[in-house]
Structure formats: structure tokens, C-alpha cells
Image: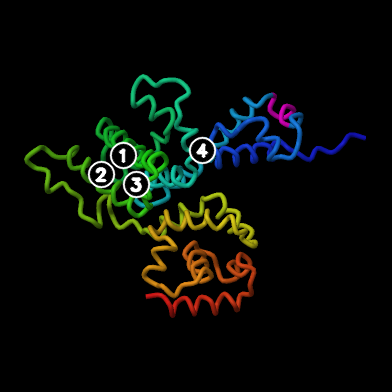
């Protein structure tokens, strides 16, 4: 009777993705992968042929995640700005996977060729630009490539420069740049002022930061797991949740304590979970306490906040 296969192709790929997420592409070695799986090399070779086969599969899976998560940005309003914010969120949330995707496998001859190959979504972006701003043809392409450059620059700064940029801050920068490029594209040198869109009607618009945060933050892999199946949060996972919270709201536990010195660690965790859209019953499971205790903790928190 053949022995059952316990280490599946899916488990190997998941372990390989986690290695890249935590240590970068260089961490994906046969030794590290065997250690993460608690097995020998045979299951890996049986499923992927070689460690290079695993690396190729990880790159493809990273691209699949990128397409899914960045594509979700088009559901925001305006959709082109939502795309830019979703791209930046992916870079901030999964910096190692983002870097792996954007690393050119072969040199691109032009900027446009690089963007078309590695950033993608050109047809969707051009359709969104035409719908929101009435720009088509060469003018639509000009705005598309200019704003992709802005998004890539912000993403590079966040992933490589250690910049603590939040989604609301990036949203403001992106919106101002869209308005500036629209002004240049639409108007002549002496007639630019009247073409600057009003705050509630243009690309800066009245994009609801709450909806944007909820749409983007929920795509974090840990948040997806916890929303789908709430369970006790391990101590080591809180750093990940605090990072998502910081990027979404431009707040940190330290800054909250500065304005509210009486906050405890428990208060801060309830605050973070509430802002990340977990219900009272979900918070009870995540914190390992009863729903009634969560309700009381939220009441105490509300009384402490300034």
C-alpha cells in the first residue's frame, strides 16, 4: 500500500511564498524550504522538478496575487486613482513579492515597454481615464504613463527607502499629481487655472478614505484569514496587524499613547481590531475573551479616548 502524500504542491508553494515574504527571494533555497516543510527534498523535486521550478512558481503566484489585489482598485471611485492606490498598497503590504514582480527578467527597451510588461492593466486604466476624465488616445496614454511613474516612485520609496508613508498620505499625493497632469494636458500655458478640477469633482474627488482602507486592508493575507475564520491571534502576529493599521490610518500605538497616556496594551488591541472592521464576536475569538468582555473593553476605551 502506497504511503499517503502529506506534503502537497500547494503546501510547498505556500511555504515558499512565506519564505520570500519574510526573507526576500534569496531566502528561497532548498535547505530553507525543507526546513519550513519539515521534510526532505524529494517532495519538492516531485512537485516542481527543481528549486528553480519552485522559484518560477512563486513568481507566477506573486503575479496572480498582484493581478487580483491591484485589479480590485478599479472598484473604487475614481477607478484610476483606486488602481494607483491598490498598486501602492500591494507594495507596502507585500514588499518582497512586489519587488520580485517588478524585477525585470530581461532589460526593457523603453519605459512604456517596462510598464506594459510588469505593471500591466493598461486597457483597464485607459478605460477608467476615458470614463472619469474624458481623455482618449494619446492624451489618455500620457496621463496613464505619467501617473504609473508616480505610483512606482511612491512604491519604491516605501519598499526600498523605509519611508513610513500611509495610504491617506499617498492618496493625497497621487490626487494632486493627477490634477497637475490634467491641467497640463488639457490647457495651454495661459489658460490653465480654469481647468483645475474642483475638489469634489476631480481626481482628488471625495474618495471615501474609510471605504478605500477597508477595500485595500482586507486584502492583507493575515486579515483575510482572520476575517474568514476568526481565531486567537498569536503574539508574533500583532506586529503584522499593527503595520496594516499604521499604513491604513497613519497612526501607531505610540502616537495613540502620546495623546491618550492611559491606554493599555489591551485597549490598543481593541482599538486596532475595531478599526480593521472586526465585529464584537470576531474580536472575542481573536482576543480569547467573551463578547461581553469585548463590549466592556470598547466602552472603557471610548471613555479614555480624547
| Vertical side of 142 occupied by 73: above or below | below
Q: Which residues are magenta?
A: 44-49
Crowdedness near tag 4: few (<14), some (14–19) or many (≥20) residues, C-alpha within 10 Å: many
Q: Which residue is identified by label 2? A: 177
Q: Which residue is identified by label 1? A: 150
Q: Which residue is identified by label 3? A: 81
Compare marks 2 and 1 and give the one earlier in the sequence: 1
> Could you tell me how many numbered marks the image carries?
4
Marks 1, 3: nearer the viewer: 1
Marks 1, 4: nearer the viewer: 4
Residue 286 in the image: state x and y as whole percent.
61, 64
* Residue found 64% across the figure and 62% down from its top: 232
Q: Main secondary structure of the magenta part?
A: helix
- State how far apart marks 1 and 3 are (Cα): 11 Å
In the image, is 102 to the left or to the right of 178?
A: right
Circles 2, 1 touching at the beta carbon (< 8 Å): yes
Residue 56 in the image: state x and y as whole percent.
59, 28
Compare marks 1 and 3 and give the one earlier in the sequence: 3
Compare marks 4 and 3 and give the one earlier in the sequence: 3
Provide the secondary structure element on which disc 1 rests: helix
Amino acid at each position: 500500500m502506497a504511503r499517503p502524500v502529506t506534503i502537497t504542491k500547494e503546501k510547498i508553494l505556500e511555504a515558499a511564498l512565506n519564505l520570500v515574504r519574510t526573507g526576500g527571494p534569496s531566502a528561497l533555497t532548498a535547505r530553507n524550504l525543507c526546513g519550513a516543510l519539515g521534510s526532505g527534498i524529494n517532495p519538492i523535486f516531485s512537485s516542481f522538478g527543481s528549486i528553480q521550478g519552485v522559484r518560477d512558481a512563486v513568481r507566477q503566484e506573486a503575479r496572480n496575487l498582484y493581478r487580483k489585489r491591484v485589479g480590485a482598485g478599479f472598484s473604487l471611485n475614481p477607478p484610476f486613482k483606486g488602481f494607483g492606490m491598490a498598486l501602492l498598497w500591494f507594495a507596502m503590504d507585500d514588499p518582497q513579492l512586489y519587488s520580485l514582480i517588478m524585477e525585470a527578467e530581461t532589460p526593457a527597451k523603453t519605459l512604456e515597454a517596462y510598464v506594459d510588461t510588469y505593471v500591466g492593466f493598461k486597457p483597464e486604466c485607459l478605460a477608467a481615464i476615458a470614463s472619469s476624465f474624458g481623455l482618449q488616445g494619446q492624451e489618455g496614454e500620457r496621463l496613464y504613463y505619467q501617473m504609473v511613474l508616480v505610483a512606482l516612485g511612491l512604491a519604491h520609496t516605501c519598499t526600498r527607502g523605509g519611508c513610513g508613508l500611509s495610504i491617506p498620505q499617498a492618496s493625497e499625493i497621487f490626487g494632486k499629481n493627477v490634477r497637475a497632469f490634467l491641467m497640463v494636458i488639457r490647457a495651454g500655458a495661459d489658460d490653465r487655472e480654469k481647468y483645475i478640477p474642483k475638489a469634489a469633482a476631480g481626481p482628488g474627488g471625495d474618495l471615501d478614505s474609510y471605504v478605500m482602507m477597508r477595500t485595500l486592508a482586507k486584502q492583507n493575507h493575515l486579515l483575510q484569514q482572520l476575517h474568514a475564520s476568526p481565531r486567537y491571534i498569536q503574539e508574533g502576529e500583532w506586529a503584522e496587524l499593527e503595520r496594516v493599521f499604521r499604513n491604513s490610518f497613519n497612526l501607531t500605538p505610540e502616537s495613540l499613547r502620546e495623546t491618550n497616556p492611559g491606554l493599555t496594551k489591551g485597549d490598543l488591541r481593541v482599538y486596532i481590531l475595531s478599526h480593521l472592521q472586526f465585529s464584537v464576536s470576531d474580536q472575542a475569538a481573536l482576543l480569547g475573551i467573551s463578547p461581553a468582555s469585548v463590549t466592556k473593553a470598547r466602552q472603557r476605551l471610548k471613555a479614555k479616548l480624547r
